[in-house]
Image: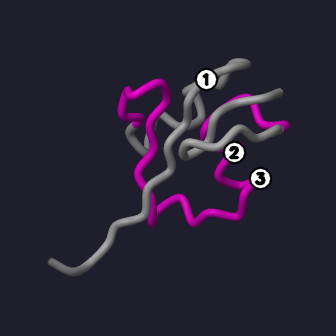
Amino acid sequence: MRITLNGEERDIASRDIEGLLRELDYRPDAVATAVNREFVPRGARGEARIAEGDAVEILSPMKGG
């Protein structure tokens, strides 16, 4: 399925955020996630479905100022 991930189009196999994080080798405890600009809490990632054309953001915290 084709989605927009962090602003770039990408083909993925996963159908939910939890699976997508595993597919892309992200540490689930070290990122924030959103689907179509809606924040997805860590505990809801298994139920947060991804559909064709969705915009997904996976963000890592940054230090600095």
Percent of width and height locating residue 30: 45, 66
Q: Is residue 49 above or below residue 14?
A: above
**Callout 3 secondary element:** helix
Callout 1 amino acid:
Asp
Crowd tier of the residue under label 2, counting other residues whose Cα lies within 10 Å: few below 14, some 14–19, many 20 or above: many
Residue 55 position (above or below residue 61): above
Quarter assignment of residue 5: top right
Magenta part of the protein: which range? 13-40
Residue 20 left/right relative to 65: right
Q: CA distance from mark 2 to mark 3?
A: 5 Å
Above or below, 27 against 43 in this view is: below
Circle 2: element type: helix
Which residue ends up furthest to the left in the rendered image? 65
Answer with the quarter of the image where residue 31 lies.
bottom left
Give the image location of residue 35, x and y in percent.
Answer: 49, 29
Magenta stretch: residue 15 in it?
Answer: yes
Q: Which mark is residue 20?
A: 2
Residue that badge 3 annotates: 23
- Upstream in the sequence, badge 3 or badge 1? 3
